[in-house]
């Protein structure tokens, strides 16, 4: 048994999230229990475990006083823990969306409990139910059969009909704190007699990004490969994990690296990584990036595109015949489409290659368009930034107007931007970056002064002016310091 399953909380007092634990204790202490519950919050933080504890609570036949429920020892408690209780049904809404399943569910709801006192339906990812199924559920929630409990779990409560939400007692699961996670890991380590130190556990907790499930899995991996979870061993174990981590993959995608991306997917498959979970983690990484960059329209655009792409992959992974195929297609669709990306990094080191690249470059040129530049704008910025922050700042206040693989036309809105970007030093940085991103060798930068320079203030919204001026000021002060 994996450590995660072994150390799943089994009673109310074992719940790892302090707030949820206290809240649940209070509700359970009251006379009448709500028949419908909604547990919402990120994945891997104990929603389903809590639902099972509740199922035990209503069915426990232990003889102790009510506050000690569930006892964890009576037949019902044991059966529910083992997942064999006939009256406690766990339904994954993501994979049981069909009309037959719903009909089946309705039947089951109508029947009286067979063995237990109460019937409990635990519906995981309830937001994935079809409209029809959600309707059936709503009807049941409106007129709940006696001795029946519905425990709905979701990572996306916003996608649920408000009519369903309003009928439930809602418990919101927040991401655990580092302390809550290290406490949990510490308990597991002590119980398993695994050598650890505080720093090691903290490193694992941080890497798990707010998921108990991931934290324990990581902890277990490190323990199995390194023998202990001390600071040093954790760092090494996490390094290995990172090599196949979502951050690494999303960075490759952002850079349009097709071949590396495909190799990465292959590695995931051979290492037996759960691809749906991996895709989910990638979406989380990109979402975080999006929330940090929502003000930047070019970054925003490409991030949204990639997130939507991965959401589709996530769906396709349920039905695909070849498990890694959806991710491979995603990599190819988001790649730069040019194999030169692999030759390009060598160019800097080996001069003779340059001619070859140039030949390939002229062949590649002409097949690109303005849209390509817009799609790759973020990548261009990323190439420019480490070379020169000021040039990147300047680029932010320009607008791409045309690109054919040889020449990039940029519109600038201030004369001093034109002068600065037009200087040999700045020009070269941009030309090399664009060439590198498209794998076409250096391109030529053509600058033109845009319309905004005309003092027609009424045509420019206040926001635009403000933003532009700030950027302009930022850029010019930095450029002066070059
Ligand atoms: Zn019991």
Image (spheres, rainbow, N blue to C red):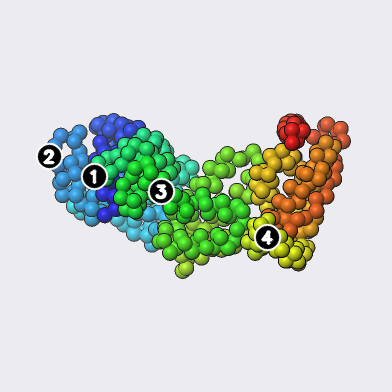
Residue bearing mark 2: 63
Q: Which residue is mark 4?
A: 350
3D distance between C-alphas at marks 2 and 3 = 49 Å
Sequence-first tag of 4 and 3: 3
Q: Is residue 148 left or right of residue 391?
A: left
Q: Which residue is mark 1?
A: 193
Pointer 3 residue: 236
Q: Earlier in the sequence, mark 2 or mark 3?
A: 2
Q: Of residues 199 and 347, which is closer to you in this image? A: 347
Q: Are marks 3 and 1 in contact (CB under 8 Å)?
A: no
Q: Residue at x 15, y 34 (%)?
A: 65
Drawn side of residue 56 relative to residue 364, left or right = left
- Asked if the residue at label 2 sits under 8 Å from ligand 1, the reply is no
Given this view, does label 3 or label 1 mark the residue nearer the observer?
3
- Residue at 66% of width from left, 57% of height from top? 349
Q: Considering the numbered disc 2 on the image, is that residue within a helix, a strand or a loop?
A: loop
Find the distance from the CA under tag 3 to the CA under tag 1.
Answer: 21 Å
* Near-viewer residue (349 or 375): 349
CA–CA distance between discs 2 and 4? 79 Å
């Amino acid at each position: 048994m994996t450590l995660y399953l072994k150390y799943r909380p089994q009673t109310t007092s074992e719940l790892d999230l302090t707030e949820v634990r206290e809240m649940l204790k209070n509700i359970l202490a009251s006379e009448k229990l709500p028949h419908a519950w909604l547990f919402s919050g990120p994945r891997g933080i104990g929603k389903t475990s809590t639902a099972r504890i509740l199922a035990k609570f209503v069915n426990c036949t232990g003889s102790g006083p009510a506050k000690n429920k569930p006892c964890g020892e009576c037949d019902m408690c044991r059966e529910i823990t083992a997942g064999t209780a006939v009256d406690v049904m766990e339904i994954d809404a993501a994979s049981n969306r069909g009309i037959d399943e719903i009909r089946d569910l309705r039947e089951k709801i109508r029947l009286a409990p067979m063995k237990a006192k109460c019937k409990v339906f635990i519906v995981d990812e309830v937001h994935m139910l079809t409209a029809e199924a959600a309707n059936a559920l709503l009807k049941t929630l409106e007129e709940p059969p006696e001795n029946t409990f519905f425990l709905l779990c979701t990572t996306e409560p916003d996608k649920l009909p408000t009519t369903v939400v309003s009928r439930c007692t809602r418990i919101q699961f927040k991401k655990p704190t580092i302390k809550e996670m290290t406490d949990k890991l510490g308990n597991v380590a002590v119980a398993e007699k695994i050598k650890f130190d505080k720093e090691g556990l903290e490193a694992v907790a941080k890497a798990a990004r707010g998921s108990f499930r991931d934290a324990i899995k990581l902890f277990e991996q490190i323990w199995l490969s390194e023998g202990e979870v001390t600071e040093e061993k954790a760092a090494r174990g996490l390094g290995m994990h990172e090599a196949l981590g979502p951050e690494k993959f999303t960075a490759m995608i952002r850079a349009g690296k097709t071949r590396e991306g495909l190799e990465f997917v292959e590695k995931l498959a051979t290492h037996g990584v759960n691809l749906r979970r991996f895709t989910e983690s990638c979406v989380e990484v990109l979402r975080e990036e999006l929330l940090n960059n929502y003000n930047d329209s070019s970054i925003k655009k490409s991030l949204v595109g990639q997130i939507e792409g991965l959401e589709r992959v996530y769906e396709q992974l349920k039905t695909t015949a070849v498990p890694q195929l959806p991710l491979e297609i995603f990599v190819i669709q988001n790649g730069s489409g040019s194999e030169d990306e692999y030759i390009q990094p060598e160019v800097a080191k080996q001069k003779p290659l340059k001619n070859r690249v140039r030949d390939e470059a002229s062949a590649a040129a002409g097949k690109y368009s303005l849209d390509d530049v817009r799609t790759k704008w973020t990548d261009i910025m990323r190439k420019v930034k480490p070379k020169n922050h000021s040039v990147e700042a300047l680029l932010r206040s320009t607008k791409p107007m045309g690109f054919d693989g040889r020449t990039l036309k940029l519109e600038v809105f201030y004369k001093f931007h034109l002068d600065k970007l037009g200087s040999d030093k700045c020009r070269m940085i941009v030309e090399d970056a664009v060439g590198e991103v498209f794998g076409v060798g250096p391109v030529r930068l053509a600058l033109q002064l845009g319309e905004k320079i005309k003092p027609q203030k009424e045509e420019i919204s206040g926001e635009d002016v403000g933003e532009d001026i700030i950027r302009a000021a930022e850029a010019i002060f930095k450029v002066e310091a070059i």
